[in-house]
Amino acid sequence: MVLGKPKNRGKQTEAAGSTRRRFLRVGSVAATAGLAGCGSVLGGSSLDTLSVAYKPIFPFLQFLVMDEREMLSEISPSVEATNFANQGLNIVTAYSDGDVDVAFIGITPAIRMKHKGVPGKVTAANQTGGFAVLTSEEFASLYDEHGAAAFEKFRSQHDRPFRFSTFPKGSVAYVLLRQWLDEELGVGTGNVTIENMAGLGPVRRALLSGNADGTLIMEPIPTVLEARDAPFRRITHTGEFIPDSPGGIMFMHDRVWDENPDIARAVLRQHRNATALINDRPAEAAKSVSGAFGDRLSRTLAQQAIRSPVSNYITDPRAIVGGTELCVERMHALGQISETVSTDDIFEPSLYRDLKTQ
């Protein structure tokens, strides 16, 4: 099997239960030329559509902004976006099958794909940091007093290990949690158990039900729990113990960034515009993310989460190279990849450099 093989250019059928939104450029001479078979307005692209895969979560906030504000509507070919949330669909599998051109994913799935030789590069970072360590108030007090020794103190007081609940072992959250426990604190998992769960909801329920003592998780969960006066406290965040800590990224297939660089730069330009909007006008960005979350997240809480010190929204992929190197080393130590992967194989910064000179 060839991973990341070219898309089937014939008629595409929608995955069961998925939602897709097509951005069509209309009302312009350039669009008319494209529809008439005269090629892309950006230089004769061989792409019929640009397939984008995402989930509506904070590490992919740039896409939520681009989607809600139709910032990709001026790109030719048309953009077909698929929301992979809660549909039993896997972005990495779809990408590896060649059905996706641009994937908004975490850095650890990108590392695993490059380890397997899947074509594509990280052409934009979405954020640095992004994850907070939350623990019960009781443990937070122990940590304030004893630091890393708090885990041993907790075990002696409760006759059981501290229970973390976080995302699956291949996730960014799990790898960053292990980096904190193993390297930053040097305590490993001797006095800790880690339960791996799929999704924000199960982790939040484990905390509120008392089945977990802490987690490493992204916004908006820390902000939501604080708003509800839940008995948990942030004791650190990834930006404090991993310089240039990576989170969400934009992973772009070679057939886009290498073979259709004008299209790739157009997407990256809108990513940069979305980042500027998030940082300069967070109230407007909150509308986009609140709309994606629905009734589960008010616009007020969304804005608070965007302003959280946990996350710094960026576009420059070079900003997370150092943190990515640490993730590669931790994944190798955990046996998630059999050999390390060079960041030169993971990142393609030339598109962003081109934008900076324009």
Image: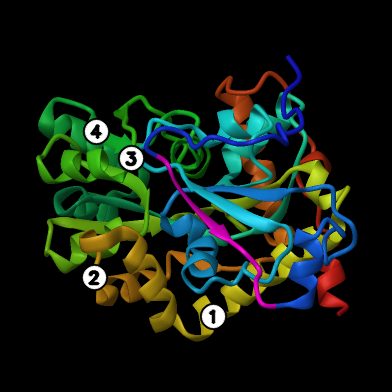
Which dot marks residue 199?
Answer: 3
Amino acid carrying label 2: it is Ser
Residue at 69% from the left image edge and 50% from the top image edge? 49
**Disc number lying in front (3 or 2):** 2
Amino acid carrying label 1: it is Leu
Near-viewer residue (68 or 351): 68
Is residue 98 a member of the stretch shown in magenta? no
Say which label, 1 or 3, has the lower sequence index: 3
Mark 4 highlights which residue? 163
Which dot marks residue 303?
Answer: none
Amino acid carrying label 4: it is Arg
Which dot marks residue 298?
Answer: 2
Is residue 26 a member of the stretch shown in magenta? yes
Amino acid carrying label 3: it is Gly
Q: Tell me where the magenta segment starts and ends, as one range.
A: 18-27
Query: Eyeballing the image, is 237 above or below 282?
Result: above
Say which label, 4 or 1, has the lower sequence index: 4
Secondary structure found at label 3: loop
Estimate the x, y position of residue 237 in percent, counting from the top left: 42, 57
Contact? badges 3 and 4 (CB < 8 Å): no
Q: How far is mark 3 from mark 4, CA to CA?
A: 17 Å
Mark 1 highlights which residue? 277
How are the residues colored? rainbow
Say which label, 3 or 2, has the lower sequence index: 3
Residue 5 in view (yes/no): yes
